[in-house]
Amino acid sequence: MSEITGTGPLKTVVHVEEVEQVEVAPGIVSRKVGITGHARGWLVDFAPGSEWPETDVHATEERYYVLSGEMIEGEERHGAGTYVVFAPGSRHRPRSESGARLLGITVL
């Protein structure tokens, strides 16, 4: 994977399964799948019964698309095919009872 900069490549191709996994918490792994001067892309896998380790507070906008499984945000459930957008200043603590895979973008 390479970083895209103002003078760098105009396209980056990432083979997700080749990207190093980082354990966020027990049952949750994250992969950085792209970084530019404007946004950061990530893929997160939640095992069944896992919960983000702390409340996630956003200084900037964050978006994610549920690729598989189901995410729970407070009392709301977001299944596969759901696109969720958090405004700057928002906070949440996602969890999953069934397991889930998310593709997300943090706007810088």
Image (cartoon, helix red, strand yellow):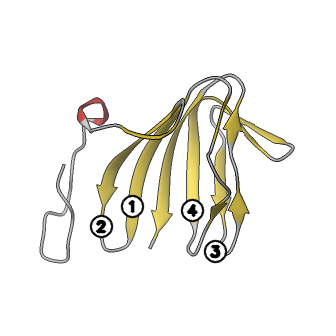
Q: Residues within 10 Å of mark 1 (few under 14, many from 20)?
A: some
Name the residue type under label 4: Glu
- Name the disc covering residue 62, or none: 4
In contact (CB < 8 Å): disc 2 and disc 1? yes
108 displayed left or right of 71: left
Residue tagged 3: 88
Above or below, 103 against 67 in this view is: below
13 displayed left or right of 75: left
**The C terminus: image quadrant:** bottom left
Cα separation, mark 3 vs mark 1, equals 15 Å
In contact (CB < 8 Å): disc 3 and disc 1? no
Quadrant of the image occupied by residue 8: bottom left
Identified at 57% across, 44% down, the residue is 65
Sequence-first tag of 3 and 1? 1
Residue tagged 1: 40
Query: Where in the figure is residue 77, as x and y percent of width and height?
Result: 79, 38
Name the residue type under label 2: Thr
Identified at 60% across, 69% down, the residue is 58
Sequence-first tag of 1 and 4? 1
Cα separation, mark 2 vs mark 3, equals 19 Å
Taking depth in this image into account, of 31 and 77 the one nearest to the observer is 31
Element class at badge 1: strand
Residue tagged 2: 36
Identified at 72% across, 26% down, the residue is 97
Q: How many marks?
A: 4
Q: Residues within 10 Å of mark 3 (few under 14, many from 20)?
A: few
Q: Farthest residue toward the right? A: 75
Q: Residues within 10 Å of mark 4 (few under 14, many from 20)?
A: many
Quadrant of the image occupied by residue 6: bottom left
